[in-house]
Image (spheres, helix red, strand yellow):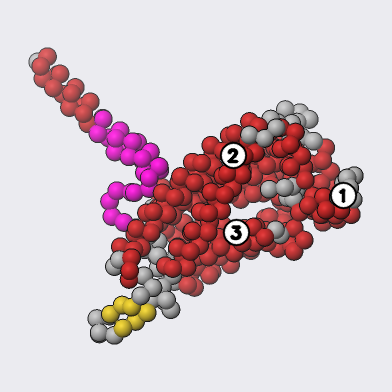
Amino acid sequence: APFVVRVHRRRLAAWCAKMAWQYYAQGALSFLVPLPPGEAMPMGPRPVQEVALSVAVMTGLCCLVGRYLTRSDLMLRCAARLHPADSFRDEAWDEVRLGLEGCVAAATAIPDEESDGKAKGRQSAKRRFATELLFITVHNGTVSVLALLAWLLGSPSLALHAFALEVAYEVFDSFSLGLLRLEPETLIHHIVSPICILCSTQTEVDFRVLCHLCICIDLSGAILGYSKFLLRYAHVSTTKVYQNLTLVYALLRVVGPLVDTVIIVWTEVRTRGGLFVLGGHLITEDGIHTHLVATDWTQLYFWAMAVLNSFNIYFFYVIRARARLPPHVVASLERTGCH
């Protein structure tokens, strides 16, 4: 009898270890390297009408919510509950009372008291204000949650709505900043990012890989937006904040997206029949020579991913450099809105 009990205990322990590996260890590994087991669940190609409708609805929703939140003190009051009393500078509350338009006008009309005051005033006017930084956190956090739910529920349709909400923010932010505050690198990002997202809906990449990429980008964006808010409007250690951001950017904006890029490129190249087929001639079943450029999204998708990965690596080095600067220098850069 004791021998039988020991055998059953060993079998039970082996079964528990197997279940733990299957549901927890493999889940953790798939989050680091998104190669979900089982049958692939391609994202697309999805009908253009479906993508356009999702983008239109999400853009309208994002613009309505974004306009309200960036012009009210709701997010600022919520953030104040997470920190000790009087932890924010009065400047944050003054901006809410003035409104975004008033803040831009004041920053442009009243230059700093230096010899190059006009230039500094224009640079200060380009920076994002408190509610705009907090809305980045709210929006990116929402997109991350939607992408995670889509992954867990196995729903490519929900993933499409999450991706469309990301495109919606690029549209909203472009109009919100306007020509006065829209800097060249921001404009490039707001053009290339929607191209990358829309192209992904026409590929046969597993949607869970795209959800992983979305979570990496938007989770790090939410952390970055809130960190920028604290750096400009709260009494925090600039060195410590940038040291933490360096780690976040390294994992979520460099390593994670590069792993996803390799998986996406490998999947698309394999689907298309090889690297040298991309952009070349293809013989159909009827023996007709066709060219892929007119109907294939792959080349544009690869180009957009290369641009975004370059941006991510560049800003990682910028953040790492700021983590090594003296605190008073970083504080001065943050006040003037220099990137």
Q: Is residue 265 above or below residue 86?
A: below
Lower sequence index among marks 2 and 3: 3
Mark 1 touches mark 2? (CB < 8 Å): no
Residue 39 highlighted magenta (yes or no):
yes
Q: Pick the residue in front: 111 or 177.
A: 111
Mark 1 touches mark 3? (CB < 8 Å): no
Q: Secondary structure at mark 1?
A: helix
Q: Which mark is residue 320?
A: 2
Outermost residue to the top = 2
Q: Residue at x 53, y 54 (%)?
A: 310
Instruction: Report whether 98 appears left or right of 190.
Output: right
Q: Residue at x 41, y 49 (%)?
A: 259
What's the CA distance linking mark 1 and mark 2? Answer: 29 Å
Q: Amino acid at mark 3?
A: His
Category of crowding for the residue at label 3, using alpha-carbon neighbours closer than 10 angstroms: few (below 14), some (14–19), many (at least 20): some
Q: Residue at x 27, y 51 (%)?
A: 38
Lower sequence index among marks 1 and 2: 1
Counting from the top left corner in percent of width and height, residue 184 is at 67, 60
Q: Secondary structure at mark 3?
A: helix
Instruction: State which mark lies toward you, 1 or 3.
Output: 1
Q: Is residue 197 above or below residue 131?
A: below
Give the labeled residue for mark 1.
117
Q: Is residue 267 above or below residue 110?
A: below
Q: Amino acid at mark 2?
A: Arg
- Residue stretch rendered in magenta on the structure: 16-40
Give the labeled residue for mark 3.
189
Counting from the top left corner in percent of width and height, residue 234 is at 74, 34
Category of crowding for the residue at label 2, using alpha-carbon neighbours closer than 10 angstroms: few (below 14), some (14–19), many (at least 20): some
Instruction: Report whether 148 appears left or right of 29.
Output: right
Q: Quadrant of the N terminus?
A: top left
Residue 81 highlighted magenta (yes or no):
no
Q: Secondary structure at mark 2?
A: helix
